[in-house]
Image (cartoon, rainbow, N blue to C red):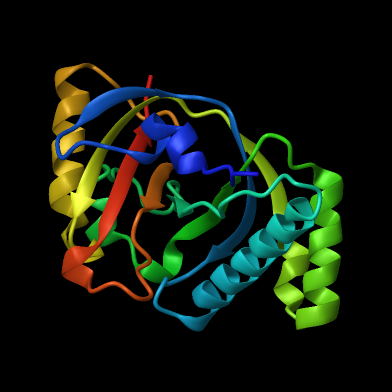
């Protein structure tokens, strides 16, 4: 049996152009874990480890019943305390809000057939066999983003403000306003890829 590859099944979800575009995103389900702080710090990488360990354990549970799938790309939702940091737009936040103040939800998309019950089994396995205590905090998460503006960002995360500026200009031109958390889909594994070769989808839910 062929593996289900969500990047091929949902091409609109996992592809973007190098200029802003308006897209409609379907309902999707994920495993996720939340945190706060600088993505260069160890707690962030520990959360990634817990998420991937759980994702691969789920994969092997389903592979055993002939429902194998490819573990999808890592994603992240990002936000901050807007009452504390007021008057920021999507460009200024990236440089004016300290990294330590950013909250996040890391995500890996799941096939529709994966259930909450099997997720709990996978978490128990990760805890008992790998001793990764953060697996306790892995959650089943459903998300409906709907209408979004997105763009493919090429290069290091430090140059994202230039891409976000293009997205912001597109939103202003088309009278679109923010309607959700800043969303990043990491098409490259940033733990192994040179920063100038990174490919990241930047997505902003709008209304």
Tell whether 117 sits left or right of 1: right
Q: Locate residue 106, reporting x and y percent.
A: 54, 57
Tell whether 160 sits left or right of 64: left
Residue appearing at x 55%, y 28% in the figure: 144
Check the image and report above or below for 116 versus 124. above
Kindly tell me whether residue 91 is visible in this rendering. no
Check the image and report above or below for 35 versus 201. below
Q: Locate residue 47, reporting x and y percent.
A: 59, 70
Residue appearing at x 67%, y 49% in the figure: 68
Q: Quadrant of the C terminus?
A: top left
Check the image and report above or below for 7 versus 139. above
Q: Quadrant of the N terminus?
A: top right
Kindly tell me whether residue 20 is visible in this rendering. yes
Q: Quadrant of residue 35?
A: bottom right
Q: Quadrant of residue 97?
A: bottom left
Check the image and report above or below for 22 versus 71. above
Residue appearing at x 57%, y 77% in the figure: 46
Tell whether 91 sits left or right of 14: left
Q: Residue furthest front?
A: 1
Q: Locate residue 7, reporting x and y percent.
A: 45, 42
Residue appearing at x 51%, y 25% in the figure: 26
């Amino acid at each position: 049996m062929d593996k289900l590859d969500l990047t091929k099944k949902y091409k609109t979800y996992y592809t973007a152009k190098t200029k802003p575009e308006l897209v409609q995103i379907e309902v999707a389900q994920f495993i996720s874990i939340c945190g706060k702080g600088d993505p260069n710090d160890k707690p962030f990488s520990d959360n990634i480890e817990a998420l991937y360990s759980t994702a691969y354990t789920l994969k092997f549970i389903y592979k055993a019943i002939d429902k194998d799938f490819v573990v999808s790309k890592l994603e992240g939702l990002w936000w901050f305390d807007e009452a504390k940091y007021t008057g920021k737009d999507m460009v200024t936040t990236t440089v004016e809000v300290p990294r330590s103040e950013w909250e996040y939800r890391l995500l890996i998309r799941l096939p529709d057939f994966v259930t909450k019950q099997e997720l709990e089994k996978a978490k128990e396995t990760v805890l008992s066999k790998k001793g990764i205590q953060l697996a306790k905090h892995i959650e089943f998460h459903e998300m409906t983003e709907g209408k979004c503006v997105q763009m493919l960002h090429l290069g290091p995360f430090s140059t994202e403000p230039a891409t976000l500026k293009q997205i912001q200009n597109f939103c202003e031109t088309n009278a679109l306003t923010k309607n959700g958390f800043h969303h990043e889909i990491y098409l490259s594994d940033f733990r192994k890829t040179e920063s100038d070769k990174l490919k990241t989808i930047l997505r902003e839910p709008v209304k």
